[in-house]
Image: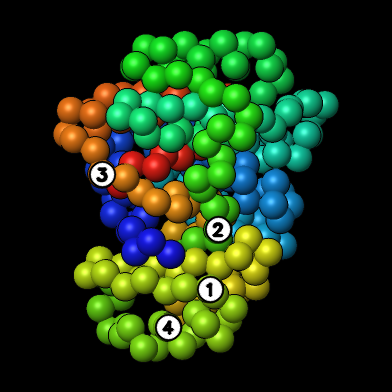
Amino acid sequence: MSGHSKWHNIQGRKNAQDAKRGKIFQKLAHDLYVAAKAGGADPEMNASLRLVVDKAKAANMPKDNIQRALDKASGAGGAKFEEVTYEGYGTAGVAVLVEASTDNINRTVSSVRNSFKHFGGSLGTSGSVAFQFDRKGYFAIDREANPDLDEDTILEAALEAGAEDVQTSDEAFEIYTAPSDFQAVEAALTEAGYDLAEAEVTMIAQNPMSISDEDREKLDKLVDELEDNEDVLAVYTTAE
């Protein structure tokens, strides 16, 4: 791993979005969809989904919103959605990867392309930036919420559970796994009593790049507009 803290980015984005209730619900809907798609739409049989459902309830997300995300993942009600990935570049040459689920490809690609154009970016071809990311299972344990945990204990527990890497910062313990080991590692950590602040299968930039504050502002606006698209599930960039 590069040593770059995903937790730092999560907290930064969360702080920026806290005033936007719709953004919070959209992120939760994405996490519900991904968890249900990976392990089934029954929270009792899917620990990852159960964690996200609990977060959604704690955030007062309406039950209808929760169910709609689960129905979208399971295809309930005859809904037919296709998963698509768009690749492109934002300001300063930052690679941008967009995952979406749509029932209208033409509508979605047009909207995504326009978002890139609005903020000085460009939509690329398939494979143009995906090679710059690795799909990983990711867990974070908030150190502030768990002040008694020490690095050696977490490292031993994570590696024994099958994790590939553990990174420690003042804010969090971050644990990375192969996607195929995600559920096994999550089950082991949960059974050991660890409170997971984040648990997801995500895309990690291989070589995060530093950009100026001005370029960061433009990139954040692009990401915000993409995330406002109801078809978009997640947006990943190679910016630190």
187 in relation to 98, above or below: below
Quadrant in the picture for residue 103: top right
The residue beneath circle 1 is 164
Label of residue 124 in the image:
none
Looking at the image, how many numbered discs can be counted on the residues? 4
Report the mark closest to the observer, 3 or 4.
Answer: 3
Residue at x 56% of width, y 86% of height:
160
The amino acid marked with disc number 4 is Leu
Question: Which tag, 2 or 1, sits closer to the chain's start?
Answer: 2
30 in relation to 152, above or below: above
148 in relation to 136, above or below: below
The residue beneath circle 2 is 136
Dot 3 lies on which element?
A: loop
Residue at x 41% of width, y 12% of height:
117
Which x, y percent locates residue 181?
Answer: 65, 69
Could you tell me if the residues under marks 3 and 4 are in contact, i.e. CB atoms within 8 Å?
A: no
Please, which colouring scheme is shown? rainbow
For marks 4 and 1, give the CA distance.
Answer: 10 Å
Could you tell me if the residues under marks 2 and 1 are in contact, i.e. CB atoms within 8 Å?
A: yes
For marks 2 and 3, give the CA distance.
Answer: 22 Å
Neighbourhood count class around disc 1 (C-alpha, 10 Å): few under 14, some 14–19, many 20 upward = some
Is residue 229 visible in the rendered image? The answer is: no
The amino acid marked with disc number 1 is Glu
Could you tell me if the residues under marks 2 and 3 are in contact, i.e. CB atoms within 8 Å?
A: no
The residue beneath circle 3 is 210
For marks 3 and 1, give the CA distance.
Answer: 25 Å
For marks 2 and 1, give the CA distance.
Answer: 10 Å
Label of residue 155 in the image:
4
